[in-house]
Image (cartoon, grey):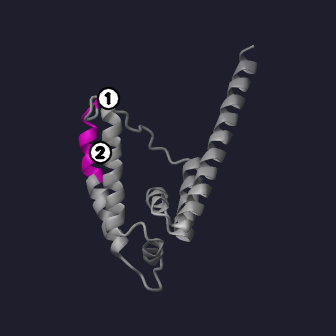
Amino acid sequence: MQHRISEFLVGLLFGMGLILSGMTDPGKVIGFLDLFGTWDPSLALVMGGAIGVGFFAFAFAKKRTVNFLGGALHLPKSNQIDKPLVIGAALFGAGWGLAGFCPGPALVSLAAGQPKAAIFVIFMLAGMAIFEIKQRRLSAHSLKMAANHST
């Protein structure tokens, strides 16, 4: 139960930060991406702050084996840039630029009742589902091929 309370509080803090920084406003994000129009550089400050916090947080986390609540701490080990990463990044960027949302702000905006966020979240979930289905099929195919080669 303690984990759920801390997860809720961290999520609440994150959501409040998104609201206070204006990142739940798609116009602010689109304004940041409009380099040759009415460019709004404030998102760069938010990103810079997040990178700074993340840099020190990950440096600290790399020295630990357990999280603050005593659970196992698993950090990603892969740093490979592959085709799925590039395609995913391109799709993320296109969605971000077209809608003005990324997943965190979209969920906060959805909770606030923004219809545009609902559409974004539906398509985000659909994309996640398609990815999972494809990954399962690839895994099943790989297992089948390995079984055929071992006999």
Tag 1 residue: 71
Tell me where the magenta segment starts and ends, as one range: 54-66
Secondary structure state at the residue bearing disc 2: helix
Most distant residue in the top direction: 151
Q: Nearer the viewer, mark 1 or mark 2?
A: 1
Most distant residue in the front direction: 113
Q: Which mark is residue 100?
A: none
The residue nearer to you, when weighing 114 against 122, is: 114
Identify the residue at horizontal 44%, vertical 44% (top origin): 79
- Circle nearer the N terminus (1, 2): 2
Mark 2 residue type = Phe
| 29 sits to left or right of 148 | left
- Dividing the picture into quadrants, the one containing residue 123 is bottom right
The residue nearer to you, when weighing 76 against 49, is: 49
Mark 1 residue type = Gly
Tag 2 residue: 58
Residue 72, given in percent of the width and then of the height, sits at: 33, 28
Residue 106, given in percent of the width and then of the height, sits at: 48, 60
80 falls in the magenta region: no
State whether the magenta stretch is mostly helix, strand or loop.
helix
